[in-house]
Amino acid sequence: MTRALFNQMMNALHFLHSNNFVHRDIKPDNLLVGSDLNLKLADFGMAGFEADLEKKNFATCCGTEQYMAPEIFSWVLEQKNTFFEGYKGKPVDIFSAGVVLFMMSLGACPFARAVPTDPQFSYMAAGEWVKYWSMLEKGMEVTVSENLRSIIQGMLEPNPEKRLSSQEIA
């Protein structure tokens, strides 16, 4: 069931992204599942239209902390720096969807916040995925398949320019 719901979530994101819309608050509370197991994406209160930005980036902090991409936290910390240019919406959605996939698959959050001071996220930020997975599997007494690791790593990639797109995931 996790795979089917994940596919539906990614299809919804791919549709939005293909039409230059971004959600900016992907989280379980905004994924509605009917009795027929069809998923609906809800709460577009923070959504945005990327074409309106005319080659600019989003410059507002929005979303739910546990699901926020690291570039949003960077923007908050660096907003007084006139050289910091905000963030792109599509990679933010993918990151949040990666957190949701992690939670759907493993029943826990991958980290508290996507900031360098978070112990779990620091492994990701340093590219030390082998250490991260080893620590996680030992602590949770689970084994995560290579396929699941690969997709989660691509979605939770700290660098938004290297993060998978909705098209690549679909």
Image: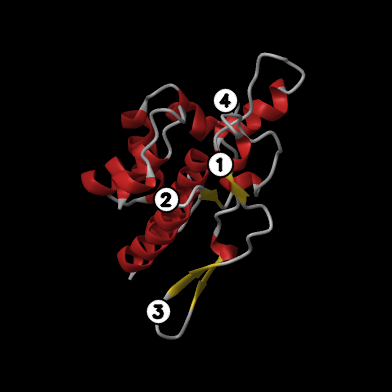
Helix, strand or loop at label 2? It is: helix
The nearer-to-camera label among 1 and 4 is: 1
Q: Could you give the CA–CA distance between mark 3 and mark 2, rounded to whole angstroms? A: 24 Å
- Mark before the other along the chain sequence, 2 or 1: 2
Q: Residue shown at 40%/41% (left/top)? A: 155
Q: Could you give the CA–CA distance between mark 4 and mark 2, rounded to whole angstroms? A: 31 Å
Q: Could you give the CA–CA distance between mark 2 and mark 1, rounded to whole angstroms? A: 11 Å
- Where residue 51 is drawn, which disc sits there? 1
| The image quarter in which residue 152 lies | top left
Q: Residue shown at 69%/58% (left/top)? A: 45
Labels 4 and 2 touching (C-beta < 8 A): no
Q: Could you give the CA–CA distance between mark 4 and mark 3, rounded to whole angstroms? A: 37 Å
- Where residue 18 is drawn, which disc sits there? 2
- Where residue 37 is drawn, which disc sits there? 3
The nearer-to-camera label among 3 and 1 is: 1
Helix, strand or loop at label 3? It is: loop
Q: Is residue 43 left or right of residue 166?
A: right
Q: Note whether residue 61 is visible.
A: yes
Q: Is residue 48 left or right of residue 16?
A: right
Q: Amino acid at mark 3?
A: Leu
Q: Position of residue 69 (x, y in %)?
A: 55, 38
- Mark before the other along the chain sequence, 1 or 4: 1
Q: Is residue 28 left or right of residue 129?
A: right
- Where residue 116 is drawn, which disc sits there? 4
Q: Residue shown at 63%/63% (left/top)? A: 43
Helix, strand or loop at label 4? It is: loop
Labels 2 and 1 touching (C-beta < 8 A): no
Disc 1 crowd rating (10 Å Cα; few below 14, some 14-19, many 20+) is few
Q: Position of residue 50 (x, y in %)?
A: 56, 42
